[in-house]
Image (cartoon, helix red, strand yellow):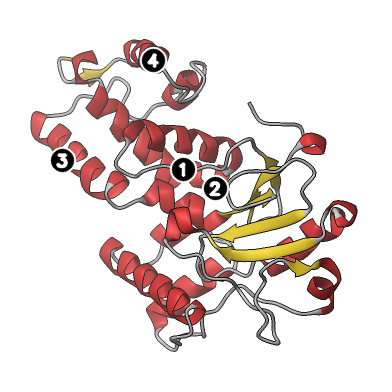
Amino acid sequence: MEKKDKEATAWMIKNDGTEIPVVTHWYADKNEIDEVLALSYHLWEHDESSRDGVLRGFFDLWMMRTFPEKMKYGAMKKDKVNDAIKNYVSSKPYFIFPKAFADTITADWFFSGRRFSASRIAKFNEMLDERWIRGREIVNTVNQRFLRARYGGKKNTAPGNKDMYFRISSVGFDWFPLIRSFVEKRADTIETVTIMRDAESTGSEAFYRDAAGSAYDKIPFKEFFAGQGNTNLLSISESGAHMQIQKILADGGSAKELGELDMDYDTIKGILSLMNQLEEEHLSGGA
C-alpha cells in the first residue's frame, strides 16, 4: 500500500512532473514474469500513454500463453480467462495486482471470441518470448519514464534524515528541472541533494555533475540552488534515425511513440543501447 504524500519518504517521479509516493521503488527482473506483471500494473495505473502500446500487447500475449486451456475450438472465452487470471493472482504468496484488475485487462479484449490457428498461436508465443520479455520493454519503459527519489539513502529511508537521493535510469532526458522543483517544495526537510545513476537498473552508481563539474554527492541545499545542472548528457546526433529517437526521449516520449517511427524494432533497440553506452561513458569520464 502506498503512503500518503505528507508521510512519504520515497517517490516514483514521472517525467511529466507527477510525484507518486511509494513504500518501495518499482523494479522487475525481466525474466520473472510475476515481477513484470506487477510492474505492468503500476505502469497501467500511472502511465496511460503506455497502455495502447507496450502494455496492451504484453497483457494480450501473456493471457493467451498462460491460459491455453481456456481456448475452446480455437477461440478465447473472456469470462473464462477473467476467472483464470483472478485465480492465478490469488494463488500467489505475494501481491501481483488486485483481482479486479483482471476486469480491466480483459475489457474490450482483442482476442475475445476470435479463432486462431495453432501456427498463429505459436507466433504469438514467439513474440512474447522474443520481444515483450527478453526485449525488456516493460522494464525499460519504467526506467525511462520514471525517476526514483528517496530520503536517507539509495535503498533504505532513515527516519528524520534530510539527505535526498535521486536515482536516474533513463537516457536522453533532463530530469534537473523536475528535481529542482521537487527539492524547492520541500526546502525545510532537505539539507543535501544527491543525483546519481540507479545501480539496480543500470549497474552504475556514477554521480551526475553540475555545470562547474562538482558531483551531486550530498551537495548542500544552498549550493544545489546556486548552481546549474543537466542530466541529459547526449550530444545532438547528426544521424536522422538517432536524431528522431533523441527528440522523443528528450521530450519525455513513450514507447508507443518510438514504435510509431518508420524504422524496424531492432534498429530502435540498437540505437537505444548505444545511447545508454554513451551516457555511461560520459559519466565515467570516457567521453
Question: Residue 84: where, in percent of width, then height?
Answer: 33, 13
CA distance separating discs 3 and 1: 20 Å
| Helix, strand or loop under label 4 | helix
The residue to which callout 4 is attached is 82
- In this orientation, does residue 10 appear? yes
- In the image, what residue occupies the spot 64% across and 58% down? 166
Q: Earlier in the sequence, mark 2 or mark 3?
A: 2
- In the image, what residue occupies the spot 37% across and 12% down? 91
Q: Which quarter of the picture shows residue 24?
A: top right
Q: Earlier in the sequence, mark 3 or mark 4?
A: 4
CA distance separating discs 2 and 3: 26 Å
CA distance separating discs 4 and 2: 24 Å
Instruction: Indicate the amino acid at tag 2.
Output: Ser
Question: Residue 139: where, in percent of width, then height?
Answer: 42, 48
- In the image, what residue occupies the spot 20% across and 24% down? 115
CA distance separating discs 3 and 4: 23 Å
Residue 123 is marked as 3
- Marks 2/3 in contact by CB < 8 Å: the verdict is no
The answer to whether residue 32 is left or right of residue 50 is: left
The residue to which callout 2 is attached is 49
